[in-house]
Image (cartoon, rainbow, N blue to C red):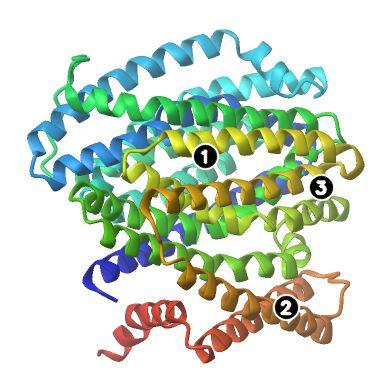
Amino acid sequence: MNAQGRRVAKAAGLMMVTAFLSRLLGYVRDWFIYTHFGETYATDAFNAAFSIPDFIYMLLVGGALSSAFIPVFSSMIATERREEAYRTAGVVVSYMLVAMAVLISIAFIFTEPLVHLLAPKLPAPFLKLAAHLTRIMFIQMFFMALNGIAMGILNSHHHFTTPAWGGILYNLGIITVGAALVSKLGIAAFSWGVVVGAFCNFVIQIPALKSTGLKLYPSLDWRNEGFRQILVLMLPVAMGLAVTQFNLFVSQNLASGLAEGTITALRIAQRIMQLPIGIFAISIAIAVFPTLTSQAARGETDDFKRTLNLGLRQVFFITIPSALGLMAIGEPAIKLMFEWRRFTAEHTIATAQALFFYSLGLVPYSALQVLNRAFYAIKDTVTPVSAAVVTIFANIVLSIWLVKPLAHVGLALAYSMAGYINMIILMLMLRKRLGSLGGRQVVTSTALASAAAVLMYLAVRGAILVTVGTTWATKTVQLEAVGVGLVVGTLVYVGLTLALRMEEARMVTGLVLRKFAWKQLGK
């Protein structure tokens, strides 16, 4: 692996560790909520309350702006136009705050009808609860918006540590405030926790921003060249994200007409499926994005394709066994994590069923994290949007078609099927744009990883059956089932891929050994 690859691997490794800690705290947060309230209309209202704030955030910052800001800002940094980059950042922040204020004000006024549109079949008291929780969560959006810009600036300077730790503080804020105030405020305590967590997430970025030498020049100068480039790149992404969010709204609308707790079951299952994406795929994608952007800015096409190839192979190598692992230990893991107090065995079964079908889509949605950023790095935001429109339409059609015979499982299956459509379209379009991407190497690596993962799945299921059976009645047995599954799965998969002499296996295990074992031995 060359120096560029080592830098990407090191950054990805750091982000995987912090992402794991953040997701672990996210589980603690969910455990507090769902063991206190179960899969009920109250938790359905809490989950529905994220819809409008998430939509505004993704539209302006989380997806659209960051996808356009990092390529432009990184290009300026890479070509020694630092002062110009800072002036552009000042204009972007100024317009972003104005846009956020306008959209939040409008959404605040029309919160109740918007919530009714998104989850129309919730009982009336819980629709009012969802509207109340939504208004609380609007407050955190200003801090999340500022954090999104801060993360873009720091990542453009190849600074990943502080943004990674911000996610940990975010979840700590939710847990601390929620646990402290739940007896007084009910489930609204966790919405106030979201506000406090978002504030902490932003504040921790400030010292790191100062260390980069950042100088912000607040301005509404719409003629700023960098701002206009970002706007041109951002508009197609915003349109695509609007379509994507519309698809989520359709799924939520359909789920609100199913059994009580269905929205919550789908959200828990999707959050568990997102664990490997958040820990591994997003970490790898964020780590390669500034490198891809810099290589594209300097016209280093061959290096760009090698970095992309490496990112995809790493993602497939990790997420293929992750998907099969979730299928193998999903039910005992959900029992262990959530089945207590008001979270019943029936809730576990509904969530586990959804998780199985969501897991089918883990691989394509992980690959999309890298593929989308590859297009953004070459300042092409139209192609990902075009692919998104096609796949979102397919997702909506599949959801409506499958929800009747399969209920909530049909919504999970439709989501996974759409992911494969999106991934295939982007791969084909990227190959047409750049030429050969080393596809034979990716296919060979994916085939070997898939074969090893299937054998791993069989080994895990067999080991759990032999050691603890299939009832998993107590927490001790559930912990044993999950522990056996994780240990056997890891040993079998790593052993097989090392025996197959896969480069990705040597890369990942080498990184782990260098970070932990050799340090302990003083080497």
Give the structural element (helix, strand or loop) at label 2: helix
> Is residue 107 left or right of 147 when viewed as pictured?
right
Find residue 177 and name its label. Answer: 1
Q: Position of residue 414 (x, y in %)?
A: 74, 44
Of labels 2 and 3, earlier in sequence is 3
Cα separation, mark 2 vs mark 3, equals 28 Å
Give the structural element (helix, strand or loop) at label 1: helix
Cα separation, mark 1 vs mark 3, equals 34 Å
Find residue 279 and name its label. Answer: none
Of labels 1 and 3, earlier in sequence is 1
Q: Position of residue 423 (x, y in %)?
A: 56, 51
Q: Residues within 10 Å of mark 2 (few under 14, many from 20)?
A: some
Cα separation, mark 1 vs mark 2, equals 32 Å
Q: Which residue is mark 3?
A: 409
Could you tell me the amino acid type at mark 2?
A: Glu
Q: Decide: is 175 above or below 69.
A: below
Q: Position of residue 192 (x, y in %)?
A: 53, 31
The quadrant in which the N terminus is found is: bottom left
Q: Which residue is mark 2?
A: 480
Could you tell me the amino acid type at mark 1?
A: Val
